[in-house]
Image (tube, grey):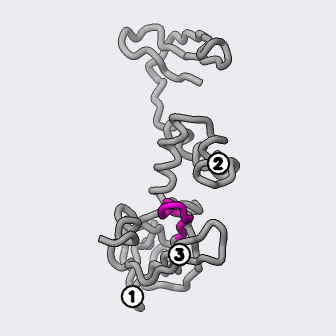
Amino acid sequence: MDGTQVLTLGLGLQAPWKLKDQHLDTTSSPHRLELYVEADRGSLYACPECGKACPAHDFADKSWRHLNFFQHHCYLHARVPRTRCPEHGVKRVEVPWARPDSGFTLLFEQAAMSLVREMPVLAVSRQLEVTDKRLWRIVHHYVGRMLGDLDLSQVANVGVDETASRRGQRYVTVFLDMQRQQEPVIFAV
Ligand SMILES: [Zn+2]
């Protein structure tokens, strides 16, 4: 298995998408590994509304930052079609390797989120060599989605406690469900 196969594992490259080309750009610093993904001409794509296989209406060139390849940054490029569905009209298709409107692959976002659990966002942004502003956008998306899934409809009494951690340099605020014996923590910041 070569390096590019390792990098494309887990990208969700399924028909009609496949890796067409790759090239290491040594003129930029850090060097960039460019991966080009494409679909065969005349491929059909699922309408994002109903899933019906529809022909492409037009294409737009899109790029996503992907996991580093050794010390090199890696970018994925693809021409992403809009489908023309008889029922829903012209819609941009969703690619299997990234969220709509994200400039990062899902694998990059997963790696970033697992690092953010362990260290401050600014430190992660330096390690991944991405601006902290862009990183915060990823964090807000996933945290927002997690909070949206939080069901507080059964909570009647909330307790709040603040405690210092690491010799008073950082403070943790904990919100507790006072009626729950097991795992009472609702949220901690
Ligand atoms: Zn449709």
The extreme left residue here reads 1
**Where is the N terminus found, in terms of image quarters?**
bottom left
Q: Which of these two is toward me, 182 or 135? A: 135
Q: Residue at x 58, y 74 (%)?
A: 62
Counting residues from the N terminus, which is met first, the one under dot 3 or under dot 1?
3
Q: Does residue 86 sit above or below 168 in this rendering? A: below
Marking on residue 34: 3
Q: Which residue is drawn at 38% across and 69% down?
A: 3
- Magenta highlight on residue 71: yes
Q: Residue 3 carries which label?
A: none
Using the numbered discs, state the Cα–Cα distance from disc 3 to disc 2 in whole angstroms: 21 Å
Give the x, y percent position of residue 53: 36, 78
Which mark is nearer the camera, 2 or 1?
2
Considering the whole magenta stretch, tell me its main secondary structure. Answer: strand
**Is 140 in the magenta?**
no
Q: Give the range drawn in magenta.
A: 66-75
Q: Mark 1 points at which residue?
A: 40
* Residue at the (56%, 16%) spot, across then down: 174
Per the image, label 1 sits on a secondary structure element best described as loop
Q: Tell me which label, 2 or 1, sits earlier in the chain.
A: 1
Asked if labels 2 and 3 touch by Cβ distance under 8 angstroms, the answer is no
Q: In this picture, is 178 found above or below 138?
A: above
Give ligand 1's quarter of the image.
bottom left
Amino acid type assigned to the residue bearing label 2 in the image: Arg
- On the image, the x and y values in percent for residue 36 come to 48, 79
Which residue is at the front of the view, 76 or 176?
A: 76
The residue under label 3 is which amino acid type?
A: Glu
> Residue 25's spot in the image, x, y percent?
58, 77
Q: How many numbered tags mark residues here?
A: 3
Question: Residue beneath label 2, please?
Answer: 126
Secondary structure under the numbered disc 2 in the rendered image: helix
